[in-house]
Image: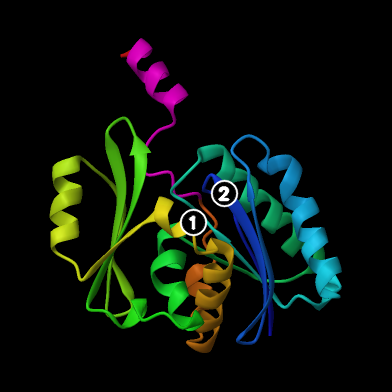
Amino acid sequence: MLILAADTSLPIFSVALLRDAALIGAVALEGRSSRNEKLLPAVDWLLTESGVDRHEIDLFAVTRGPGSFTGVRIGLATIQGLALALGKPICAMSTHEAIALGEGNGGSTLPHLERIAVIDDAGRGEFYVSLFEGHREIEPPHLAKSADRDAAVQSVVLAVDVADFLQHGNVAAACARRTREIVAENAVDRYADVTPIYVRLAEAEVKLQQKNG
């Protein structure tokens, strides 16, 4: 099976191509303000350099956030467009699930640990936090203050900081590996939801509510 995966929810966006268990190629680029201009060219470059025609892709995978609101929308819209044009299915998951569970298929022991927390800076003194145990999500992404984040860290075997992960890992590759596992479990239908995981309102919406409230 050939899987093309993308993550645009984070400051460094990524695209990866996985054939069965083998990573064919992956790319990661800074994209805070340029994901829209870079994503499709990155996909095309990866396919060309890998000698793969896009029609060979069996399944598309994409992260839903949390992260950059604009980035999440760009990734979901782009991957949905490609999948629709090629008549291929989509497997969509939280960015945290890709990080926590997708790395295991690449040789890490993360999924075999008792409990894992994934933590990302959400700004405004808050954090996005998810918890995983027994190779499944037990608490979906939610907002937490510093005290709650610290409590989550103390309750797990391993806490993964997303910013640190970006320095050595490729989120799209992790997403592709997790997708392969989901396919093996015949659970792709459970990952058909492509609704963005925003967790909280965008800054503009908060200001509008404050103005109207």
Viewed as shown, does residue 45 lie left or right of 106? right
The residue shown at (40%, 60%) is 96
What residue is disc 1 on?
167
Q: Nearer the viewer, residue 60 or 11?
A: 11
Q: Nearer the viewer, residue 34 or 195?
A: 34
Q: Residue 53 location in percent, x, y?
A: 86, 73
Q: Amino acid at mark 2?
A: Ile
Quarter of the image with the C terminus in it = top left
Q: Secondary structure at mark 2?
A: strand
Magenta segment range? 196-212
Q: Residue furthest top?
A: 211
The quadrant where residue 125 appears: top left
Magenta includes 200? yes
Q: Residue 124 location in percent, x, y?
A: 31, 30
Viewed as shown, does residue 114 lie left or right of 35? left
The quadrant where residue 52 appears: bottom right
Quarter of the image with the N terminus in it = bottom right
Q: Residue 190 location in percent, x, y?
A: 47, 72
Tag shown at residue 12 = 2
Viewed as shown, does residue 78 lie left or right of 112? right
The residue shown at (29%, 53%) is 129
- The tag earlier along the polypeptide, 2 or 1, is 2
Residues at circles 2 and 1 in contact by the CB criterion of under 8 Å: no
Q: Amino acid at mark 1?
A: Gln
Q: Residue furthest front?
A: 167
The residue shown at (52%, 88%) is 184
Q: Residue 149 location in percent, x, y?
A: 20, 49
Q: Nearer the viewer, residue 161 or 62?
A: 161
Of circles 2 and 1, the one toward us is 1
Tag shown at residue 109 = none
